[in-house]
């Protein structure tokens, strides 16, 4: 499989290279927080598709301090790559779901580390407020700060179906209070959620292009073991229209055509460990191979990010 060198979309690794002039590695962290749709505040059980072990490396554990997790992560990656600098990635669960003083202490423990050039914080759109934004905005004057919101869908019916316990209006509000504060704003979206068709997913591209998003992670829906969705899938698999790789490539390329051209695409696919993946099975194809397929499809069909994008106001 050969890669088509000329990229037809705004890719994250080029952005990072041009920003920092070197390879940067993210170190995932687990703070031991939970989520409002898990602890009963808004709901229980969490999102129906969520299995946190799908994105927790071995060195991540809330039993260890942030510093310990960072040291272990750095040790692991420094053997693998000649990377010198790292981003602390607050990845598991909702990493703004605590009091401001706890959050300040936690983020500062990461940014105080000499090899950490910045932080990336994964959270939900309904777990952000002005006090957190104001702290992160101040921090962004000296460190790279990225805040990633799980949007997942722009359709409230879907959000309800997957037990997100927030609305798309919450997403719009989160971006409104976070924009123009020196913070890089990220978004996460899943393609292929139950009861969504291709038209719905193209609408996602149009709607999120109206938000002040800097970076975007997209991936296909995966059914993972030990999730509510796995039980639903076992009972009524006909209700799921899981995307095959052959369907996903043209769909995601079309999605990219409707996306605002300046949005940096950080990810196109999820690659959960095979031990926990139920469906769809894409025969073990690796992420980088899928990215090559996407690049080649865009080139062969003369498509590019923003080809069909129409400018509208936020
Ligand atoms: S997907 Fe995110 S918000 Fe949903 S339950 Fe999992 S960690 Fe919480």
Image (spheres, rainbow, N blue to C red):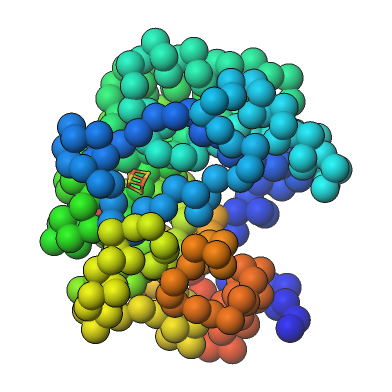
Q: Is residue 309 above or below residue 96?
A: below
Q: Residue at coordinates 29% horizontally, 74% vertically from top-left?
A: 234
- Location of residue 232 (image quadrant): bottom left
Q: Position of residue 311 (x, y in %)?
A: 32, 61
Q: Is residue 232 above or below residue 40?
A: below
Q: Position of residue 118 (x, y in %)?
A: 61, 29
Q: Residue at coordinates 18% horizontally, 32% vertically from top-left?
A: 41
Front-lying residue, 155 or 21: 155
Front-lying residue, 278 or 35: 278
Q: Total marks drawn?
A: 0
Q: Quadrant of ligand 1?
A: top left
Q: Residue at coordinates 38% horizontally, 57% vertically from top-left?
A: 226
Q: Is residue 221 left or right of residue 67?
A: left
- Location of residue 71 (image quadrant): top right
Q: Is residue 299 left or right of residue 122?
A: right
Q: Is residue 263 above or below residue 299?
A: above
Q: Is residue 79 above or below residue 223?
A: above
Front-lying residue, 269 or 73: 73
Q: Residue at coordinates 28% horizontally, 32% vertically from top-left?
A: 127
Q: Is residue 37 left or right of residue 148?
A: left
Front-lying residue, 129 or 127: 127
- Location of residue 24 (image quadrant): top right
């Amino acid at each position: 499989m050969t890669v088509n060198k000329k990229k037809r979309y705004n890719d994250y690794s080029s952005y990072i290279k041009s920003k920092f002039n070197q390879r940067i590695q993210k170190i995932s962290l687990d703070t031991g927080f939970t989520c409002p749709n898990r602890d009963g505040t808004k709901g229980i059980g969490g999102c129906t598709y969520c299995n946190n072990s799908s994105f927790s490396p071995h060195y991540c554990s809330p039993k260890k301090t942030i510093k310990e997790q960072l040291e272990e992560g750095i040790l692991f990656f420094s053997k693998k790559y000649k990377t010198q600098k790292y981003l602390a990635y607050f990845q598991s669960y909702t990493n703004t779901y605590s009091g401001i003083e706890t959050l300040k202490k936690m983020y500062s423990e990461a940014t105080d580390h000499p090899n950490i050039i910045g932080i990336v914080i994964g959270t939900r759109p309904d777990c952000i407020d002005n006090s957190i934004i104001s702290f992160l905005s101040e921090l962004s004057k000296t460190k790279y700060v990225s805040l990633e919101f799980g949007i997942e869908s722009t359709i409230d019916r879907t959000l309800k179906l997957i037990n997100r316990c927030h609305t798309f209006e919450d997403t719009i509000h989160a971006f409104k209070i976070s924009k123009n504060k020196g913070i890089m704003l990220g978004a996460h979206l899943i393609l292929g959620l139950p009861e969504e068709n291709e038209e719905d997913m193209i609408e996602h591209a149009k709607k999120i292009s109206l938000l002040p998003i800097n970076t975007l992670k997209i991936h296909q829906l995966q059914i993972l073991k030990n999730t509510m969705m796995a039980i639903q899938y076992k009972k009524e698999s006909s209700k799921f229209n899981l995307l095959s790789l052959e369907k996903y490539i043209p769909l995601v390329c079309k999605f990219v055509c409707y996306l605002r051209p300046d949005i940096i695409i950080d990810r196109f696919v999820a690659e959960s460990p095979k031990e926990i993946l139920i469906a769809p099975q894409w025969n073990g194809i690796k992420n980088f191979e899928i990215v090559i397929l996407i690049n080649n499809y865009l080139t062969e069909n003369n498509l590019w990010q923003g080809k069909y994008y129409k400018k509208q106001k936020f």
